[in-house]
Amino acid sequence: MTKREIIYQVLEKLNIHSDDSKLSEELVSSLIDTKRALLLKQQYATKGWHMPSEVKQELTIAVELIDRVAGYADAGKVLATSISLPESIKIKGKEGPLLVRKTDNTEIPLTLVAIERVPYLFENRYTQHLTYCAVDHDGKLYLMSKDNKLRFLKSIKVTDIYEQPDVARQYESSIDLSLEVWDDNYPMEASMVDTVVELVTKDLARTLSLPADNVNDASDGRG
C-alpha cells in the first residue's frame, strides 16, 4: 500500500477533503511515520533481528577510505559512509544496521561494536582479523579491518528500518524514479495499516476537535 492511500484513509475517516486548510497531508504523513515506528518498537521489542521484509529498506551509500575515526586513535583501515545514515528505529537487540552488503549483493560479515570501542578493536590477536562496524554519533557508518579486503569498495548496501521512510527512499538501491514518494510502496506490514490509520485518526480528531468516523468499514455501505 502507498502512503498516499493511507493518508486518504485518515482524511476520509475525519471527513476532511484533501484540500482542507485545517489539516495538511504533510502532517498526516509525519504522524503515519511516528505511529509506524511506535508499533514496530512494541511488536518487535524482544526480537529486533527478526523484522519482516516489508518494513525494511535497502540503501546504496558511497563509502570512502579514511585514515582514522574522528576523535579516536588509528583504527586500522577504515571505510566511512559519505553521508550520515537516515535515523533508524531503535529496537531492543538491534544495535546497528540489519545487513551490510557489497554492491554485488555479497554479505559483509561484520561484528557490530559501540563507537567508543574503536580504539581497542585490534589489541586482541585472536579477534583482530574480524571486520568491525560502528555507527558514529553523527550517524556515519564505519567499517574497520586490519587487511585490504574492503579498501577497494566504492559503495555498500545498508539494510535497516528507518524512522522516516520518505527520507531513506532517496538512497534506496531499487527505486522507480517515475513515482512520487507517496505513490511508491510504503514499508509497513499490511496487517499494521488499520491500526496506524486508527491511531493517527484519533490523534488528529482530538487535536482538531473533529468527530472521527468510527463506523466499521465493512458495514458502512461503501463498496
Image: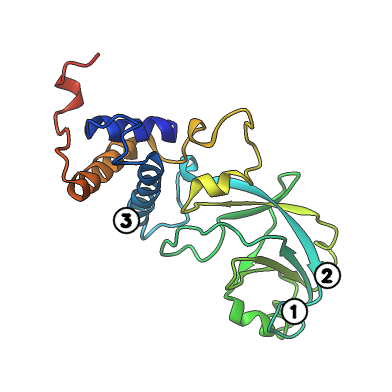
Can you see residue 72?
yes
Query: Which percent across, then down, holds residue 13?
Result: 23, 32
Q: Nearer the viewer, residue 167 or 121?
A: 167
Residue drawn at the location 30% of the way across and 42% of the way down? 196
Between disc 2 and disc 3, the foreground one is 3
**Residue drawn at point x = 23 percent, y = 48 percent:** 203
Instruction: Report the residue marked by disc 2.
Output: 147
Tag 1 residue: 75
Residue drawn at x 28%, y 41% as measured from the top left: 22
User: Which residue type carries mark 3?
Assistant: Gln
> Would you say 105 lies left or right of 188 here?
right
Q: What residue is shown with label 3? A: 42
Q: In the rendered image, which quarter contains the N terminus?
A: top left
Which image quadrant: the C terminus?
A: top left
Q: Secondary structure at mark 3?
A: helix
Dot 2 or dot 3: first in sequence order is 3
Which amino acid, by three-letter code, is at mark 1? Answer: Ala
Label 2 to label 3: alpha-carbon separation: 40 Å
What is the distance, in whole Å, between disc 1 and disc 2 at their CAs? 11 Å
> What secondary structure is marked by label 2?
loop
> Considering only vertical position in the picture, is 2 above or below 208?
above
Query: Residue 14: percent from the left, percent from the top?
Result: 22, 35
Give the distance between the C-alpha atoms of the residues marked 3 and 1, in whole angstroms: 36 Å
Instruction: Give the residue drawn at x 33%, y 40%.
Output: 192
- Contact, CB < 8 Å: mark 1 with mark 2? no
Q: Secondary structure at mark 1?
A: loop
Kind of residue indicated by mark 2: Asp
Q: Is residue 141 above or below residue 118?
A: above
